[in-house]
Image (spheres, rainbow, N blue to C red):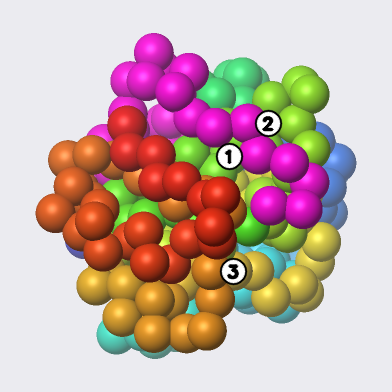
């Protein structure tokens, strides 16, 4: 699949799931298809998807603004898709809308080609406090932050305590999709950064209570990261 079709498939599933949860207006489910049939004239499912994605990009650009997720792309590119493709993605989205949150997000990560850490490794993540600032290193697309923010007794929020650094546009999209799934406040600028070398984040005047990531992706930079920790801070690599 091309970058464009991967993006379109993932955001379609995110929109379908949000519709099912009542968080966005129905366009692909409920009364949406009947309303679209009555007013669409010569427009197709491609136009409907383009409209829905543009609307979603206003409130959650980190997930739905194509040019922001992939700066090399144009927001007009969705128009080159075929109605049959969009129909397939709608069916996929309806299926994913019925899954548990973990299974849904794992399916989205798989579609984006992001390899997630094994479940048993997550038990080694820290238990941060409400005032803690946490840096997630490239490689996960917000997956570790998601687990810390989803614990029943958690004191941290995905969109308040975390800076999520992404190495690729696929990781950036997953981080945005997770924020959308968790109900991040609309129009809020999230700390989701495309910075594969960490130059942007670590050249700033900021320190963290925790730095988390995957051992395989980040072992070579582990020693250097300690200088960006607060006095009691720690680096945890799974």
Image coordinates for residue 190, horizontal then vertical, percent:
64, 69
Q: Quadrant of residue 153 in the image?
A: top right
Q: Residue at x 43, y 67 (%)?
A: 228
Q: Which residue is mark 3?
A: 191
N-term-proximal mark, 1 vs 3: 1
Question: Magenta region: which residues?
Answer: 105-132
Tell me the tag on residue 150. 2
Tell me the tag on residue 146. 1
The answer to whether residue 29 is visible is no
Image coordinates for residue 186, horizontal then vertical, percent:
80, 66
Give the SS element for disc 1. Answer: helix
Q: Are marks 1 and 2 in contact (CB under 8 Å)?
A: yes
Q: Are marks 3 and 2 in contact (CB under 8 Å)?
A: no
**Viewport quadrant of the C terminus:** top left
Say which of 204 and 89 sits in front: 204
Give the SS element for disc 2. Answer: helix
């Amino acid at each position: 699949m091309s970058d464009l079709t991967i993006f379109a498939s993932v955001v379609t599933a995110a929109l379908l799931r949000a519709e099912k949860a009542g968080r966005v207006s129905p366009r692909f489910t409920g009364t949406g298809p009947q309303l679209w049939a009555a007013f669409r004239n010569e427009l197709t499912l491609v136009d409907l998807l383009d409209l829905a994605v543009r609307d979603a990009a206003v409130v959650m650009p980190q997930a739905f603004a194509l040019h922001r997720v992939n700066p090399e792309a144009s927001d007009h590119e969705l128009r080159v898709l075929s109605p049959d493709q969009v129909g397939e993605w709608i069916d996929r989205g309806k299926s994913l809308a019925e899954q548990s949150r973990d299974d849904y997000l794992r399916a989205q990560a798989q579609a984006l080609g992001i390899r997630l850490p094994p479940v048993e490794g997550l038990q080694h993540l820290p238990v941060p406090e409400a005032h803690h600032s946490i840096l997630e290193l490239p490689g996960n697309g917000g997956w570790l932050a998601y687990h810390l923010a989803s614990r029943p007794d958690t004191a941290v929020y995905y969109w308040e305590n975390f800076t999520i650094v992404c190495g690729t546009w696929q990781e950036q999209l997953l981080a945005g999709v997770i924020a959308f799934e968790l109900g991040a406040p609309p129009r809020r600028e999230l700390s989701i950064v495309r910075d594969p070398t960490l130059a942007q984040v670590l050249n700033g005047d900021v320190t963290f209570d925790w730095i988390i990531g995957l051992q395989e992706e980040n072992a070579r930079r582990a020693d250097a990261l300690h200088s960006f920790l607060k006095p009691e801070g720690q680096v945890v690599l799974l």
